[in-house]
Amino acid sequence: MMIEVSQAQVRTGRVAAIYARVSSERQRQEQTIASQTVGLRELAATRGLLVTEDLVFEDEGFSGAILQRPALERLRDRAADGAFEVLLCHAPDRLARRYAYQVLLLEEFQRAGVEVIFAKEPERGATPEDELLRQFQGMISEYERAQIRERTRRGKLHRARGGSQAVLSGAPYGYRYVRKSEHMDAFYEIDEAQATVVREVFERYTERGESITDIARALSERGVLTRTGKQVWERSTIWAMLRNPAYRGQAGFGKTQTTGQRARPTRPVRARGERHGRRETRRDVAPEQWTSIPVPALVTNETFELAQARLQENKRYAKRNSREPALLKGILVCRDCGYACWRTSARTTKRLIYYYRCIGSDNYRFAGGRVCSNRPIRADELDAIVWGEVERLLSDPVLIRAEIDRRLQTLRTESPAAHRRDGLERELARVRAGSARLIEAYQEQLITLEELRARMPALRKRETTLATQLDALDAELHDAETYLKLAENLEDFLARLAESAQNLTVAERQRVLRLVVREVRIGDDGITIRHSIPTPTGPDDPSYLLRGSSHRAALRRALDPRD
């Protein structure tokens, strides 16, 4: 809309600036900021003020609770330079939501000789009563904003505790977010094409043992599009997908919360000439504080737990900058101070020798100096001893069969999955029959559409819960069959292990070792190997404690790095 400049405006010579602001993307799309600007231009024409294009300042999508707004920053700079005499604004809450910020800005403009006029305020003089009314308006605006935020937060939390999927807003990859309509609430709907990719990612990670990098590279090479339409999959996308509890049927609400601080400027932010990001930074909330909301599951609960276990394992055993793999990396702990041991090296005139060194023995890591007096240990000697003990442990079929029998007995007594499955199947059939009867009753006009809508959601929710429990029981039964199959082929497995044990690489030995050994604790007087297979203890059994005065010369050399 074009506003013509009248001769009266030119004669007055009073130059005015316009400031408009909207805080949300929805308001920006509905062009409410344009309506503010047009109204203020008309106000300027009515009062005979001259407004040039370079004195129109608009902040789109910025909250009034902060002062770091790009257009407001430019407005304050131009006011300090004396570029205009009058500032036109729609209302005090458009200038700032907080009363303290309103006072700060108004005093700053007053010192610069700028008169501030609000379109929603009647024209009046600068009397104490007018100033008091403006202060009340600022405080009421700040109170309303805090009240709206608190009501919105508590309302969403209440709906989340009731299992409403509407509070989750955008759906993750694998789902479609069906918006609320006149007849139903918003909900997640499975996108079968994307759900297939999600299941493939979990299968590759948990069953095939592929890395996150390999999975991302495979999806990119196949041309699979991401949720945003990109052809390149980032590792962080796969990592977030593996951690998302929605895929096992329990979406998390309240996983993050605002910190009250502005985000750091990124390259796009600096390109726009802004000092801070538009949004507040957020921090992660502990999983026990989340509110779980049932959604359609894409993977079983056991598959999701296997993915979490491997993520934790990778976090512990991450390669990082290790060029040469270490057999005991991540499981070697100092028995005296409790710190982990890391591998270092020392080069002699003949060769490079590796040692395991306690973190507590490093002076530079602690303000008061080292906290542990344990000496470094030769890595090759200690690796050979620990691997020899693990190899001896796995070569005993009696111990292995006893462990399998113990786990099978636990599975039969503590997880009677077969008995529970029959009851769940009967309950699921009853719920599905009830849903079918309701639909038939509606078709026969025995019940109204409102009654059908009121009763069907509860049945659908119950059906989804029972189906999820059945999937979990199927996984338990599959585990039982796996144990039985392992027990039947135990001798063949041990024979193959004995044949290939000497030819395994360090990385392959690591995988075997981490499946059996939980922790290796080292001290000045011996080594303690803690593993998951119980063994009968005795004076000649070195599985748990290998003394420094052992008859094995290799152990004595390992405990004395001076050799």
Image (cartoon, rainbow, N blue to C red):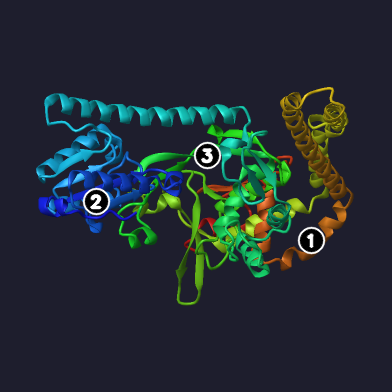
Evaluate if marks 1 and 3 touch, with contact meaning CB atoms under 8 Å apart: no
Going by the numbered disc 2, the residue's amino acid type is Glu
Q: Which of marks 1 and 3 is nearer the N terminus?
A: 3
Residue at left offset 79%, top offset 45%: 399
Residue at left offset 26%, top offset 53%: 56
Residue at left offset 63%, top offset 60%: 211
Name the residue nearer the viewer: 478 or 409: 478
Q: Residues within 10 Å of mark 3 (few under 14, many from 20)?
A: some
Residue at left offset 49%, top offset 43%: 338
Q: Earlier in the sequence, mark 2 or mark 3?
A: 2
The answer to whether 560 appears left or right of 410 in the picture is left
Estimate the x, y position of residue 307 in percent, counting from the top left: 66, 49
Label 1 vs label 3: CA separation? Answer: 48 Å
Looking at the rendered structure, the secondary structure element under dot 2 is: helix
Q: Name the residue under label 3.
A: 255
Image quadrant for the N terminus?
Answer: bottom left
Q: Which of marks 1 and 3 is in front?
A: 3
Evaluate if marks 2 and 3 touch, with contact meaning CB atoms under 8 Å apart: no
Looking at the rendered structure, the secondary structure element under dot 1 is: helix
The answer to whether 141 appears left or right of 250 in the picture is left
Q: Mark 2 points at which residue?
A: 73
Estimate the x, y position of residue 262 in percent, counting from the top left: 35, 46
Question: Can residue 56 be seen from the camera position used here?
Answer: yes
Looking at the rendered structure, the secondary structure element under dot 3 is: loop
Q: Mark 1 points at which residue?
A: 498
Quadrant in the picture for residue 55: bottom left
